[in-house]
Amino acid sequence: MQLPIVAPAPLVVAHADVFRDLCENRRQFHHFQHYLTGLIVLDNNSLANMTRGVLESADKTNLSRFCSEAPWFQAHVNDRRITYLLQQTKAVRAPKTDAVLILDATLCEPVGSLFAYVDRHDHHGDDPYPLAHHPVTSHDVSGPGRFPLDLRLYRRDEELTQWETFVHTHFPDRPMPTTKKDRTRLHKEGDPILFEDADFQKLPQQFRTKIALGIDLLEAAIRHKVPLSVLLFDSWSLAEELVSMARYRHKDGISVLKKHRNLETNSFVLKDTTGKPLRLEGPHISVEDLVPLIPSTAYRAVTVRDKTSWTFTLAVRIPGLGKVRRVVSCEHAALPGTSAVLVTNRVDWSAPRIMALYLPRWPIEML
């Protein structure tokens, strides 16, 4: 049984005054506190459930109107929140050299089809195209302090450009394809004609990739003066654009490396169990083809936060990324087995440091 919200939570009351001047009146400030309380204490923290739980509200639409119509600005609230959290965590933050910014793309699936900007997104799961919002987020991690910084909502190019609507307008007798291959073929055939439509021309310019959104989040963290030195990101964002921007901003990066990525074979030497160099065919070799060639004797046990892994590290060149250090990490001593491959631009870092810095990302993976 859900208990009613009779007053803002004590934790909310203790910190809410920092945001008081961002609300125009006392009632707005009360709605602000009740909304935060609902997010914290309710298992079902939907807006509809919050309005049912707030006892002192005379009109159950008050909270909804506060969120959608009241004259306050989310960006201002988030700016104040970040400044406040940086002040509150200053005493426990790690040195700047160990402070990281985590970039992540996630799916918020439990939403209805009537939500603004909801769409079907590619997802590696049982349902490959779930109906969801698809935000790209940033998180600050420094010592024991961890809190979310910001988000940017990713919108598919087809949704943003209303592509299907324009296709039906210009090709009324053309059935809409349901497979990715057929839709790609229709894009190639129809987009040159659609781009002759002045209204359609304006829309693709608004599309932003997840890489561009990740760069925007990095720039926002820098504007907020968040002390950070290292970016942690998943393999989806290991792209030349983001890596180049991190280098320009004097930030280091660590990422998971996809197993189909190619390595330049002339950039490293791999030896067998007898110490003799292995001959590798071709100018490139994929990660998944290289890992089985690593002899088990080359792995070393590395313990980070009471967790032991068996790792092998090697400096290599990756097309588009340049010289990097790659770490192959296996969970069990019984090699070969399931492995993860990390990569960083810091070729001078050791495997223990790379893994210790990347470890804070795992809770994000579990969300």
Image (cartoon, helix red, strand yellow):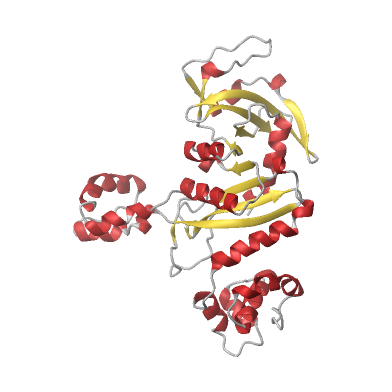
Residue at the image position 25 percent from the left and 49 percent from the top:
191
Q: Nearer the viewer, residue 211 or 297?
A: 211
Left or right of 261 in this view: 345: right
Q: Residue 25 appears in which quarter of the rendering?
A: bottom right
Q: Nearer the viewer, residue 359 or 15?
A: 15
> In x, y percent, where is residue 251?
60, 39
Q: Nearer the viewer, residue 235 or 19?
A: 19
Residue at the image position 26 percent from the left and 48 percent from the top:
186
> In x, y percent, where is residue 80?
63, 64
Look at the image and tell me whether residue 124 can be seen: no
In the image as oriented, which residue stretches furthest toward the bottom?
58
Residue at the image position 31 percent from the left and 49 percent from the top:
183
> In x, y percent, where is residue 212?
46, 47
Look at the image and tell me whether residue 239 can be seen: yes
Eyeballing the image, is 322 above or below 111? Answer: above
> In x, y percent, where is residue 232?
61, 43
Query: From the image, which quarter does the C terminus lie in?
Result: bottom right
